[in-house]
Amino acid sequence: MSHSDAPDEGRGAQSGKSRPVSAPYDSLSVTFREDQPLHLDSGETIAPYTIAYQSYGDLNEDKSNAILICHALTGDQHVANDHPLTGKSGWWDVMVGPGKPVDTDRYFVICSNVIGGCLGSTGPSSPNPVTFKPYGLDFPVITIADMVRAQASLIDYLKIDTLFCVMGGSIGGMQVLEWATSYPNRVKTAIPIATAARHSSQNIGFNEVGRQAIMADPNWHEGRYYDHDESPSKGLAVARMAAHITYLSEEAMQEKFGRNLQDRDKVTFGFDADFQIESYLRYQGFKFVERFDANAYLYITRAVDYFDLAADHAAGGTLADVFKGTKTRFCVVSFTSDWLYPSSEARTIVKALNAVAAKVSFVDITSDKGHDAFLLDEPDFFDAIQGFLSSAAKQAGLEPARTTGEAS
Amino acid sequence: MSHSDAPDEGRGAQSGKSRPVSAPYDSLSVTFREDQPLHLDSGETIAPYTIAYQSYGDLNEDKSNAILICHALTGDQHVANDHPLTGKSGWWDVMVGPGKPVDTDRYFVICSNVIGGCLGSTGPSSPNPVTFKPYGLDFPVITIADMVRAQASLIDYLKIDTLFCVMGGSIGGMQVLEWATSYPNRVKTAIPIATAARHSSQNIGFNEVGRQAIMADPNWHEGRYYDHDESPSKGLAVARMAAHITYLSEEAMQEKFGRNLQDRDKVTFGFDADFQIESYLRYQGFKFVERFDANAYLYITRAVDYFDLAADHAAGGTLADVFKGTKTRFCVVSFTSDWLYPSSEARTIVKALNAVAAKVSFVDITSDKGHDAFLLDEPDFFDAIQGFLSSAAKQAGLEPARTTGEAS
């Protein structure tokens, strides 16, 4: 990587063969310079741009064991290591690691922060190379396809031709679908989880409520709050609270919180958080603003609203046409109590894949945990992922994972 | 009404026998003076207090044909006349009027603005008799039972012993249930529509999002915005937008708006209202703040959160016990696509009524219009209401409605 047109590697950056050498909470990053712009769906470009990422496990000799994980709206690259800001475990720690369904003894796992995000990849809080100030609303509006294009640059940089698997939940699942559509020959298997091929009217509505809450906050300053002492944290907290309700199921909420009171025997006849559910939502909002940039929330929700795979990729807008001729093997996963991206959305994807005789498994996991089930300890879900990956790995001739006996 | 301890009648107030003589958009009102306080569940009292109301049709000789309609969260007493602020038709104009399901040729229909509201009844924007300024947050927190207690004062004032029917949708339905429980001998028939016997965890969550949106608005000033030039209209608009999503069904939204763009051929790659659903929700928020007081929104949502009929009225918290011995005849109505108060909530009420051998009909109306179906033109719903009322009227020996022939 010494020739002059190579991108700049971030601290701890690596060739793609070795594990990260940096501290576990430090991200690797690669910066693509001004002569390597990211071309966006809007017609605009971003240059330079940085992609922050984490990797786990080892890339094998023939680079055939790479799994790209795509994160959700407020997720980031810290899949399976402690989070640098919150100190909490990685968001998919239950799924990814040695001996786990996505077995890092067997696969080389990569996850990058989306373009437009706020955990190291270029986004609205990054310096605008023209003004030397944060972009704010001068950052161009990005799409799910733009996120995927940026990820592809990273995968190129890592000199990986074909990904053994691209997987992710929620808007991560949209990125999976986009990968399989934009780069069909680079994706051996695809696991879109708890997602949809396009964002519904209701979901656009919820996103718009969140954006209006942020924009109503006078500390937003038309996106130029970086110059001020305060950020629009109250608006962002309200946005998070509203969204958080959509991540849970009514049953789960009723079971977990019901009408239970928070540290009191009776209601106070006031506007304090009398109920546990109020206290919980307030806490979710409060914690979220510590780790997330309000403008990034605007940009990423907008990318999700714009997502419509069939409209973007098929002349007639027919979803099946998008997948015509695909050789990728799919495992589509949904959860029965998910009302943000209900099982019917998954069925729409599966039907389209069936219509073009694509290889597809469909798993509708019975769960009362709502949309967030994909982040939780759901044994049937883990079994499905492990089974699908193992079968595909066998077919692809990937070496089985080292057993404890072999490794010792 | 000339003796000294009688409440003060508002302009156009009437004895309960004649139609309102005031302009159609002017409310009747009655003010209960300091020696007639409203005793609240919190232990506090409100005095004096005013109840603003509308009435339609004529009270018959033996005062046996009165129907009390209870309005929903953001409704008011303007059931079947043009609204004084918006100029639009009354909110239940399709249901109430001559020859309509609630036939004002036959019944004397009353609707009063809830205590805590902002359309003439005493609420947080009313003058505090101690400070001579608007109450703001010094207004005591009220409950559904308090709303009903205030309505009962109005019914007393109108010298009506027994209501032929109490009916209402959403939190109006909660008031219906509370009437049948607190005043079982004063309610001949009860029609709770699209409602629940207690507010669920998820619904408390949505209410809390709305309240936090209002309270996050710096123009809220801890509820003292009446002294300032601006009110927390941005926060209130966000609250309304979030709530409005819960009033529609996903199907209805998808069918009505889908991913249709608003007055444009393609997305703008920006944060304007590209989609019709965004434009619609923004408009709903924008219009709402012209007619509603932000503090009233806080108080009424709080009353709804606190509503739990069984916990409040049955020692063991068993809903059936609440209705033990009731002679009231019930017609419980739900709508199949209502996810705010789903049909399962109605079934819970019906089961409790069945358990104590109460007279109850249950109608689950097939509709894709969501919660708001109760406000819309739903023929099956109208038929059910008309049929139930006619049958009950016959049983009660009420004279049939004048036919056109008789009236001419």
Image (cartoon, coloured by chain):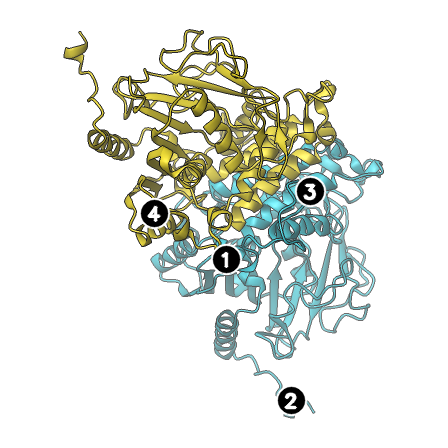
Chain colours: A yellow, B cyan
Q: Position of residue A339 (x, y in %)?
A: 43, 45
Which of labels 1 and 3 is toward the front? 3
Marks 4, 2 in one chain: no
Residue pointed to by mark 3: B236
**Chain of the residue under the numbered disc 3 shown in the image:** B
Task: Determine whether A6 is above or below A354 in the image.
Answer: above
Q: Is residue B107 visible?
A: yes
Q: Amino acid at mark 4?
A: Gly
For marks 4 and 2, give the CA distance: 70 Å
Please tell me the numbered disc located at residue B404.
2
Q: Amino acid at mark 1?
A: Ala
Classed neighbour count for the residue bearing mark 1: other residues with Cα under 10 Å, few (<14), some (14–19), many (≥20):
many
Q: Position of residue A271 (x, y in %)?
A: 62, 33
Residue pointed to by mark 4: A325
Tally of marks: 4
- On screen, residue B26 versus residue A195, left or right, reads right
Classed neighbour count for the residue bearing mark 3: other residues with Cα under 10 Å, few (<14), some (14–19), many (≥20):
many
Residue pointed to by mark 1: B194
